[in-house]
Image (cartoon, coloured by chain):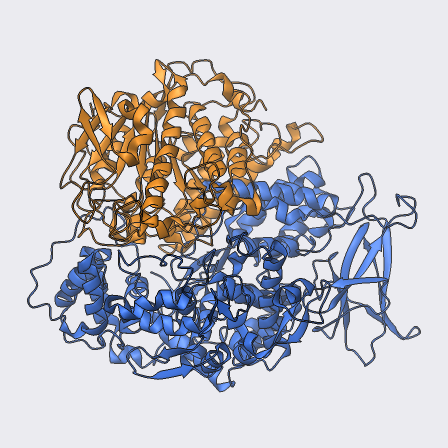
Amino acid sequence: MSLLSRRRLLQGALGAASALPLAMATRRMARATACGRARRVIFFYFPDGIAGRSQNGEPSLWSASRNGAGIALGELLAPLSSLAGDCVFLHGLSMGGTDEGSHPGGAKKLLTGVDGGNGESVDQYLARTVGRASPFRHLYLGAMATQNNASGDKFISYPSAGVTIAPEDDPVNAFRRIFTGARPSTPAPSIDAGVAGADAGAALPAGGADEAADGLALDTSIADLLELRAALGASERTRLDVHLDALHEVHGRLRTMSPTGAPSGDAGGIITLPDAGITVPTMPLPASCDAPSMGFDAPTGAGLFAPENFPAVLRAQIDTMVLAMACGMSRVGVIQASQHTSELIMSRFRGTDMYDAGFDMRSHQASHYGARQDRSNRLFADFVKQVRWWVSQFAYLVEQLKSRPEGDGTMLDHSLVLLCSEVSDGNTHSHSDMPFVLAGRGGGCVTPGRVLTYEGRRHGDLLATIAQAMGAEVERWGDSGTGALPGMMS
Amino acid sequence: MRSSTVALLCGLFTLGCDTADDAPAATPPADTRGTGAAIDPAQRYAAMCASCHGEAGEGGLGSRLIDSPRSVAALTQIIDERMPQGNPAACRGACASSLAAYMKTRFTSQALSCATVAPSMRRLRLLTRREYRATVRDLLALPPAGAAAPATPPGVDPACSRHRFAYAPAATARSVHVAGSFNGWSPTAWPMTWVESAREWQTEREIADGTHQYKFVVDGSQWVSDPRAAASMPDGFGGQNSVLTLRCAGTAPDAGVTPPASAVDVVAEATAALPVESRPQGFAYDNNADSALVTSVHVNEFLRAAQGLTAAVGPRLRAVVGCDPGADRAACANTLVRAFGTRAFRRPLTAAEMQRYGALVTGARDVEQGVTRAVRAMLVSPAFLYRSEMGAAQPDGTFQLTPWEVATALSYTYWGSTPDAALLAAAADGSLGTAAGTEREARRLLADPRARDQLATFALQWLGVETVATTPRSATLFPAFTDAVRASMLEEARRLVTAVAFDGTHRFDELFTTRSTWVDGTLAAYYGLDGVSGTTFQRVELPEARQGGVLSLGAVLTRYAHSDQGSPILRGVFVRAALVCEEFPPPPPNAGGVPDVDPNATTRDRFRQHTANAACETCHRYIDGVGFGFERFDAVGRLRETENGRPIDATGTVLDLERFGAGTRVDFTSLPQLAATLSQSDAARACFARQYYRFARGFRETAEQRCGVLDVVRRFRESGYDLRELMVAVTLTRDFATRRSP
């Protein structure tokens, strides 16, 4: 596959898309922030929170503290030990309200910052603003996140108020879609064929795939949709705007897949984002992007939902996300591991300390470990192992980013990666002192290797900080947010 | 944690204490960023409040809200600080005030009178994956799901085979058509002609090489197999499809050996990566209109599907869109936008659309390329992907569904697919503009085999059992629970419900009181029933312990269980939520999960703590007493006499079945008794109607639809709870064809 070697982020190639109104939300715009150098953000979600403070008041096993020149990590965070210098460990942030609530309540608020999920989520906002020039504005990959016909509140990405989308749970589908665009197996389309009009076919060679067909289909779809929207007035406006945005995104993608090769000015080149007037430095793509191969053997079909396969599926999704980001496919990613109130039987993960052939321990079951925080309480002992495993998966993601050179450093230097869950203490559904870890330097916006405590601040302030680091002109995010966290950004 | 437990307690019993006078002033609403008011307060009320306060504020466990003397400000304060019970953070600020305003304006005695019926919102309903697949099968004459695809070897003229169909009915027929995989199973596309000399109906057709299934359609509604067919196979409805294998002369690879039909389902393959639907909490069906967004992933996959589907149709596409073999680009463009276009968009194309799609044909290299381009473009158009329920503006400010939209609503309600030629004809000639015309078409569609399949889909989603195909179960504990058993359990559920509705008494109570079920050899062996073998499903009488209709379906028993043990809680909630339409708040934090598996205790013993614990008891008194009735079944639907060596106790109690707070109590000693109780329950009957209404309409009804739902329930009751009449009723209600704008 040589498609990728021809894929370039052409300046102005998304002109059609730039004409789109940002219709879904009017946001309070602030002055351009000082930073904005983060090249990408990945939100890594795991279900059902962590083990919190014990009933006797002993501190949570989820702890990080300064220890001389280093950072001492509690048992739950220990898998990040070798990466502590790459992470900011956050304490004290609250999801707000009375800190009461539930799993769905937390999942709805996690990325929207708004009670009831009644707002756009920050990943979606970033995707359609600072991320809109990427071939894929948004990547949402899951591992058993849609299991059991999951209801919409199990998902954490909200393109518009109150409405979620489901992640792609199949790594093979995800890989295919990202690395071959809209076409499963056909060669790259002509850059002109998709938009030059109905007579473009005359220029095509006889036989073989009709490379113009997708572009023509998108043209007619956009025309049909604009007529429909005009006829409907206020009805279904949001739905049609999201749809139109999606058509433009794919249309732009087809046009940037130039078979003639792009100017070689990529190194140090600049992408201009027409809407926001923000500039982001680009980097040459790694050689591996010329012929990306699926470096995993992932299950498909019903096997996607067998708990035994979960670790392999999640690993494949992490690998795909990292490769996609490395190849400049997207700036905004979400990885959702399982779903809140998870039925995932983690005791079936072979080769882990959770494995128990004789007993099915479900994630959510373990999270309600009760009052006894001692290892003779099987629920507690297993929950500790589970949370450690989630942290180790996040650590793997961070390691992958750290292992890939990019520009004057590594991918991690240019990235922000947030570890998050929908509740703090899974046993009590607490929404205070949320267990967030932010990894990466974000292009120098963030200085890692620190433990920062923000008592009394909302988690929306963290989301605002991340958004600003990504170059978004966002002053505040979510209910009762007060602005970016002081001391976070360099 | 303690506070929310207490709040829950208070909520269920002392709602009247919410005087709000002693509470501090509410915090002003937070900045909710842009779209904070986008969630309809009616939907919020239905989701968060209706279970206690009644769907239209008539009260129940919670206080009555109709004609409330409290001011909007006072209601706002109560909601902001205390509601919903146990989780007041879920609705504060703007949410609370919009809900309060909604209650004050909507929950009035006048609105309750149903003198006027509030129309639902104008909507675009995105095709679900299921609907998309059925639609392209019909539209492009691709084989139905599960049927063998025509296996055309490369290089063989696909249309070299002619075949004459002939049928001699026993009784006089007015019309006979042949319908099969070759013509999209259209009951009207291929009429047969009465040939007096042969005393039979005949037609001769060109059919692609390969294996096809078909039936004859007599008088437009009776589907019969061909007595002269050389082969047949199950049609999925308990009957047989006739099988026709055609092979052009000289191309048979081995004389006398019929090559196996292609196992590849091209539609399933082309659409395998379409994103899953997002179902709102508490909405059991895959077709919720408001949560269906087209993202770039959808666009990607719609493009890919369109390409794969047109490629699978291949050279046949020209004929599928209606173009004559000799037609040039201009002639074919003209035909395509009128004939195929009307089928694809379920209405005639506008002039602008004709221009656009026609140009794709005339501007192409040749007819083949042009037709393919136009079809691919139509398959990704919003006009195809959304079922329009926007209606046409009326003088009174409402919107009335057009006849085309009515036709579309009927076919997707009853068939889960696109209208057939007869339905489009009824839209075109205006007969769908009348209630009688609509009812006539509704009944015609319900008489078609496709209606059975669609009702089976409803049944699986209503019962929530689709996931039985993949939900994990312990292989150590349950080695006999194979994939084949899972698949057969789902078929059992489909058969039981459709057999009651279409072949049995047609009545609701039979869903619970039937003494039989449907099994194949796999399931019979698994259940320990004698006399059934092979892959054909048969109706069998059940021993009393296994009776209970839908309650004792293997799929239901398995779905409402954990991987290693049955769950009286999940089963009890299933009955109260899916079958009686009641809702409970989520369990409070720190409530504990399933208690540790104690090898010496029964499941029932381990869950007794719910009723021993006052905080749990407020809800679990309604749940556990019902769920215990299922105790004779394990986590994978098998009967058991003992658990851990102790005898099973499957007695139980249903409290307040008809209405929370009514104080009624029904004791039962077995699952069939619980089923019999539900079969006569007005709450369960009304709930079933409500569930079917949700499935048909694609949204969760709010108080605004209360009168429409009541109308359906009334028709259901007046029919003696006839399931077919319920199905008809949802398209006869006063709110069926009227819409409003936001």
Quick one: A195 or A184, which is closer to the camera?
A: A184
Quadrant location of residue B99?
bottom left
Quick one: A338 or B141, which is closer to the camera?
A: A338
Residue at figure coordinates x 39%, y 17% from the top left: A406
Say whether residue B628 is visible.
Answer: yes
Residue B102, image x, y percentages = 24, 66
Q: Give the chain letter for orange.
A: A
Residue B327 higher or lower than B706, as above or below? above
Residue at figure coordinates x 47%, y 54% from the top left: A148
Say whether residue B394 is visible.
Answer: no
Quadrant location of residue B568?
bottom left
Quadrant location of residue B534?
bottom right
Residue A178, image x, y percentages = 50, 32
Quick one: A43 or B707, which is closer to the camera?
A: A43
Q: Is residue B114 left or right of residue B423?
A: left
Q: Is residue B533 left or right of residue B67?
A: right
- The colour with which the image depicts chain B is blue
Q: Is residue B41 left or right of residue A240?
A: left
| Quadrant assignment for the C terminus of chain A | top left
| Quadrant assignment for the N terminus of chain A | top right
Residue B222, image x, y percentages = 72, 74
Q: Is residue B447 left or right of residue A324?
A: right
The image shows a total of numbered marks equal to 0
Residue at figure coordinates x 48%, y 86% from the top left: B718
Residue A262, image x, y percentages = 49, 18
